[in-house]
Structure formats: structure tokens, C-alpha cells
Amino acid sequence: MKTFNTLQWIGDIDGCLELTDQRKLPAEFTTIRCRTVEQLYNSIKTLAVRGAPAIGVAAAFGVCLAAQETKKLKLTDALKLIEQKINYLASSRPTAVNLFWALERMKKKLNEVAEIDILQKCLLIEAQKIYDEDVEMCRKIGINGEKFILDNSAILTHCNAGALATAGIGTALAPMFEAQKNGKKFKVYADETRPLLQGARLTAWELKQASIDVTVICDNMAGALMKDKKINAIFVGADRIASNGDTANKIGTYSLSVLAKFHNIPFYIAAPSSTFDLQIQTGNDIPIEQRAADEVSNFMNFMSAPKGINVYNPAFDVTPAENITAIITEKGVIECPTKEKIKNLINH
Ligand code: MRU
């Protein structure tokens, strides 16, 4: 059971978007309220709200914030302004396709509106629908993925693909919550996930809250654990899945998939259909976000490398489909993903 709201719309059409401030966790549980598109853009960019599905849902509500600025405008001018704000929100982070998916959906709704008086209401209804659908997708991913968690097993996960990353109970963590509900015993190793520690700060916090046995490890410890036969399965989320199954997720996921293959450990991706980008053929077409150098060289505000040092800081990497045992979606499970299987399931 989710005991906090990752994000929620407060009030009616003139309301605001409340976010759990993930930059502060686990030291502090606080919320912030975004009343403008600019505040939301900043919250996405600085990872107050993060995780592919949550970014998408937040951006949908961002369009509702944009609509609040159009009250004195004619419909055509209002639509123009909102489109500008949509493009602005779309420039916040490039990799998670859920952002573009949600904004596209809001744009479609926008183009269906014929009168300014109903514009705000129509957009809020659509954003709330995107939110509710995300909750439901997570629930179904949990049910579909639960069978891959064996009793008395140990699971490794990377970054945070839990409730904090979605409107619902998460993607990669959803099967764990479901397995716990069904009385299965298992333990979870959470990769710390350098440089921003989403694993140590967020996944460990969430699993501990849910009374799931969780152990934090530094990213470079995963291989040794696998070699010692201490990991039975790996579950991670996704930021974008190409037509052929190549999957972008948090930097470090690719290395885990190679280690998993070498040690013959099943490697599962859990993601809703909104994370598939069937317009791109392979992972080579996925734009990878490069983040600021100081996330690495001034780690947690501590000078962790010489001043002015060169830094390489991609936020994501791409795992080739051939390294993936199965992709768990709300529509079903795609084992040994191929273009054909993905097309059939996602378009169904
Ligand atoms: O940079 P982040 O924290 O937004 O990266 C998040 C991830 O990589 C998650 O694994 C992914 O978005 C899946 S979330 C259900």
C-alpha cells in the first residue's frame, strides 16, 4: 500500500501540483507546490520529481498550469500559448519518452477543445485520466511480474523504479510489493546508483517503509554478489524502449545486464506501454541526457574530484534487447523481446 503521494493535483482548475520533493529524501519528507509551468520545469530538471512515468504525469498537469495563464485570451491565442509551454516542458529532460507521450496526449486534447470556457476543465480531466491510468498500469505490472519473484530469492534492482517514480506503486518494484502481499519471502539488494543515489536514497527508503528486507550496495559490488550466487533475478525500470526492445534506463543498467548474462541470471525490465517508443527502431536512436559535471565532481556538495576536472556524466545507458530475459508490461509479459512480439503486444 502506497503511504505517500509522489504527486497530486490540489484543488480544481485553478489548483496546483503538489510533489514529494525527492531531492530531500531520505533525510526529510517534504512536499512542494508548483503553481507555474516554470516551477514545474525546474522541479523536473532538478529531479524533485523523477522517474519516467512520474515525469509524464507531472508534465500532463503542467499543461493545466499553462492553461491557467490563458483566462483573458481568445481561444486561438490560448492554444498558441499552451503549445509554447508544452514545448518548454518537453525540453526539461530528453530521455524518458513518457514525458513526450503525455504532452502529446494533452496536445491532442487541446486541439479538440472548441471553446475557451471549457479549456481548463477538459485539460484537467485528461491529466487526471493519465494519472489514474498510470496507477492502474503499475498495479497490473505488479501482478504480471510477481511470478518471476521466487520464494526465498534475492533480487537486485538499480536506481528507483518504485512508487516515487510513478503515480502508482512503481514498475520494477511493483512485482515485489505484489509478492510481499502474497506472502513470499525474498530480499532485495538496492544498487546505490551513482551519482545521484536514487537507489540508496529512494529505493531503500521505499522498501524499508514497506518492511521489505533491503540491503544497499555500492554499484561496483553487484558483480561480486552475482559471482557469489547471491542474486537470483534483476528487476529494473525503463525510460524508453525502442521497437526492437533495446531499453534506456539509469546509467549502470547496461553493465548489470552484461553481468547478468555472464552469470546466467534473469534480467527483467518492468515498464508501462507509455515507455515504448515504436517510432524509433533501435536503442541507437534514444537521446541520452548528459548532466552537469558537478553531480560527479562535487558529489553531495563535497569536493569529490579536483576542481575543474573533466567529467563524463550521462544519466542513462541502453541495454540491448538480447540481454533482456523479459519485459513486464501492464498488457502482459514479452519474453526474449523482438520487434514482432513488442508490436503485437503494445498495439493490441
Ligand atoms: O534520472 P531519473 O532518476 O529520473 O532516472 C530514473 C530511472 O532511470 C528509472 O529507472 C526509470 O525512469 C524507470 S521509473 C519507473
Image (cartoon, rainbow, N blue to C red):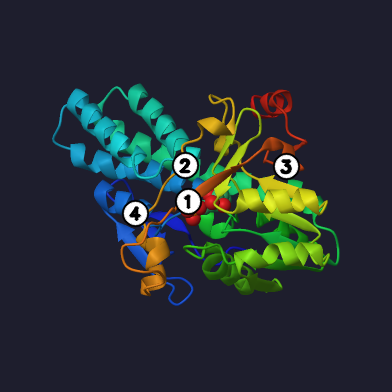
Residue 30 left/right relative to 221: left
Looking at the image, is 267 positioned above or below residue 113? below
The local crowd at label 1, few if under 14, some if 14 to 19, many if 20 or more residues have their Cα within 10 Å, is some
**Residue hosting label 2:** 288
> The residue tagged with tag 3: helix, strand or loop?
loop
Task: Measure the C-alpha gap from mark 1 to mark 4.
Answer: 34 Å
**Residue hosting label 3:** 324
Q: Can residue 81 be seen by looking at this rendering?
A: yes
Task: Measure the C-alpha gap from mark 2 to mark 3.
Answer: 20 Å
**Residue hosting label 1:** 315
Looking at the image, is 143 positioned above or below residue 213? above
> The residue tagged with tag 2: helix, strand or loop?
loop
Query: Residue shown at 29%/39% (left/top)?
Result: 88
Disc 4 marks a residue whose amino acid type is: Gly
Mark number, residue 11: 4
Q: Can residue 180 be seen by looking at this rendering?
A: no
- Residue 201's spot in the image, x, y percent? 52, 69
Query: Residue shown at 59%/45% (left/top)?
Result: 238
The answer to whether mark 1 is within 8 Å of ligand 1 is: yes
Camera-side mark, 4 or 3: 3
